[in-house]
Image: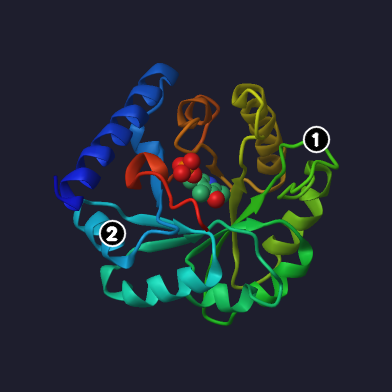
Amino acid sequence: MSRRDELAANLETVRGRIAAACGEAGRDPGEVRLVVVTKYFPASDVRLLAELGVTDVGENRHQEAEAKAAECADLGLTWHFIGGLQSNKAAAVAAYADVVESVDRVKLVAPLARPGRAVDVLLQVSLDPPGREGRAGADPADLAALAARVAETEPLRLRGLMAVAPLGEDPDPAFARLAAVHRDLLADHPGATWLSAGMSGDLEHAVRHGATHVRIGSAVLGSRPSVQ
Ligand SMILES: *Cc1c(COP(=O)(O)O)cnc(C)c1O
């Protein structure tokens, strides 16, 4: 089987899962955007995905993302940065990323705001208990201040929230908590309608709780190399 056929078959399976999850949740599949996470996979795969109708790709490491976005600049894709951000890299990320999903502290906001780059911003919220090792994302208690800062910063656009389900926990209650946090955000920022949640293993739970974007890596591209 060619790589193209393999990706096409995997995409069909994932799109079918999204459609089925939307059916069960009484949602229109057109409300859920598929972001294919291409980290650790080559630009040639990104090219095949674009040919197969993928419009949005996600990357989590700055140097790799920057190189791939440059190599694939002709494809007209929407690039999502979904990885941990350092404040000294944020300006460079905003040069190629159309959506930055991992904004979790105020310190990142000013460097992301590049003149003429109307980057879409999602605030990453932590669903882990406070103090958990390796915890990424803002504490829900700190979101209102962070949202206000993004909303007042031109030319950034506050679009919504992103989260990852906690490891080793049932994703269903975690995504229910996320949906509640999103409702609070929407009360102050009615335009912040995007909710990026759900990966290869838990997209059905995320769709049930209102995800508008799912970030799918291994279910489309296969398992990532173990040496990262
Ligand atoms: C890698 C990654 C994904 C995709 O994970 P899969 O389990 O391979 O679908 C989604 N979101 C984030 C933040 C990631 O880093």
Specify few, some or many for label 2: CA neighbours under 10 Å numbering under 14, 14-19, or 20 or more: some
Task: Look at label 2 and name its amino acid.
Answer: Asp
Q: How is the image coloured?
A: rainbow
Q: Nearer the viewer, mark 2 or mark 1?
A: 2
* Residue 49 picture quarter: bottom left
Mark 2 falls on what kind of element? helix
Question: Image height check: is 92 above or below 57?
Answer: below
Q: Does mark 2 have its CB less than 8 Å from ligand 1? A: no
* Residue lying furthest front: 227
Q: State if disc 1 and disc 2 touch (CB < 8 Å).
A: no
The image shows residue 50 at horizontal and vertical percentages of: 25, 58
Residue 201 left/right relative to 72: right
The image shows residue 154 at horizontal and vertical percentages of: 63, 72
Q: Which residue is mark 1?
A: 129
Q: Which residue occupies the foreground of this view, 222 or 200?
A: 222
The image shows residue 228 at horizontal and vertical percentages of: 52, 58
